[in-house]
């Protein structure tokens, strides 16, 4: 149902823009309208997060692309329709020349983003609809004993959810500040004990003049945090803190090196009943 709505919106906007010359309309616009939330795990990104306490890795692979840009009410109002496909995997060890992958969470869906630009700030929003499924894979299986490690067998885990995020980003003299809040609701959940409603809120602050240029590129020291309550199955508060440096302009593509602290429900959905407290060292690429 959600994907049908997305298709209807896409064609309605296309027809409207083509019949009114005052509307600005563009297929495959440059850049990315709504930038991924740094401290939100369920965002399309490319990167690796290393956990020093046990040598495990969280490996992210994904992309988020704006398909259509349009402006119906003047240049200050911006709309985009996009798609996003992503997955993150848990690697418990490195054996020979391969990563041993224990679990994978996969996501795919679409989004509609809107922003209003003020003179030195902007209102931002994103409505997205995502299918999320989780899986245990071969790294979690003990072939010699012919059993799943720790006796934890795969479960059918699915969330089809809609998510609305609103926030504000402004640009003080030192850099950038973005704060946001979001609510989500799942139209389908498995197992049934998962709560359908969830919410999160967060903050990102970057400082552009502390380090200066690196390899002739601008650099930004940043801090990001997010509190989440997704009901897995209880609405216990999860916390994720990040701090690091980005090589490249803050709202453009670049390389990010960071430290991460997380406390809350297990990041991988196959283990949603478990809790974890983890410190990590990470690297990701903003491919805006």
Image (cartoon, helix red, strand yellow):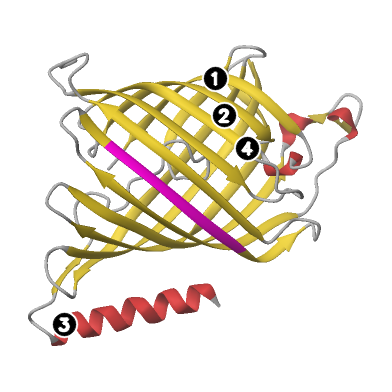
Mark sitting on residue 244: none
Report how many numbered discs are placed on residues in the image: 4
Tag 1, which secondary structure?
A: strand
Which residue is the site of mark 1?
Answer: 280
Is the residue marked by circle 2 packed among few (<14), some (14-19), or many (20+) residues within 10 Å? Answer: many
Mark-to-mark CA distance, 2 and 1: 9 Å
Residue 37 located left or right of residue 194: left
Which x, y percent locates residue 80? Answer: 28, 64
Which residue is the site of mark 3?
Answer: 18
- At x 31%, y 55%, the residue is 124
- Looking at the image, do the residues carrying marks 2 and 1 touch, with CB atoms under 8 Å apart? yes
Residue 147 located left or right of residue 43: right
- The tag earlier along the polypeptide, 2 or 1, is 2
Residues rendered magenta in the picture: 177-185
Tag 4, which secondary structure?
A: strand
- At x 46%, y 45%, the residue is 43
Q: Is residue 232 located in the magenta-colored stretch of the structure?
A: no
Which residue is the site of mark 4?
Answer: 238
- The tag earlier along the polypeptide, 1 or 4, is 4
Mark-to-mark CA distance, 4 and 2: 18 Å
Residue 33 located left or right of residue 161: left
Of tags 2 and 1, the one toward the viewer is 1
> Nearest the camera: 132 or 231?
231
Which x, y percent locates residue 85? Answer: 46, 52
Which residue is the site of mark 2?
Answer: 58
């Amino acid at each position: 149902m959600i994907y049908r709505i997305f298709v209807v919106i896409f064609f309605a906007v296309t027809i409207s823009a083509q019949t009114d010359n005052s509307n600005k309309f563009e297929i495959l616009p440059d850049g990315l309208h709504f930038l991924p939330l740094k401290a939100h795990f369920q965002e399309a990104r490319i990167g690796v997060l290393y956990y020093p306490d046990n040598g495990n890795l969280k490996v992210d692979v994904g992309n988020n692309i704006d398909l259509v840009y349009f402006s119906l009410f003047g240049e200050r109002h911006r709309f985009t329709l996009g798609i996003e496909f992503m997955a993150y995997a848990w690697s418990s060890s490195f054996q020979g020349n391969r990563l041993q992958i224990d679990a994978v969470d996969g996501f795919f869906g679409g989004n509609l983003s809107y922003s209003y630009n003020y003179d030195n700030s902007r209102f931002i929003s994103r409505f997205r609809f995502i299918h999320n499924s989780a899986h245990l894979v071969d790294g979690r299986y003990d072939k010699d004993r012919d059993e799943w490690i720790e006796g934890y067998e795969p479960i059918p885990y699915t969330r089809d959810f809609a998510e609305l995020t609103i926030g504000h980003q402004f640009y003080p003299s030192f850099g950038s500040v973005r704060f946001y809040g979001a609510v989500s609701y799942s139209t389908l959940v498995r197992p049934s004990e998962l709560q359908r409603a969830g919410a999160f809120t967060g903050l990102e602050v970057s400082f552009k003049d502390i380090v200066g240029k690196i390899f002739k590129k601008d650099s930004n020291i940043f801090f990001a945090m997010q509190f989440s309550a997704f009901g897995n199955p209880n609405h216990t508060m999860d916390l994720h803190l990040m701090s690091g440096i980005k090589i490249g302009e803050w709202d453009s593509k670049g390389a990010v090196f960071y430290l991460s602290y997380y406390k809350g429900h297990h990041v991988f959905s196959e283990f949603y009943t478990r809790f974890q407290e983890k410190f990590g060292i990470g690297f990701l690429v903003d491919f805006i």
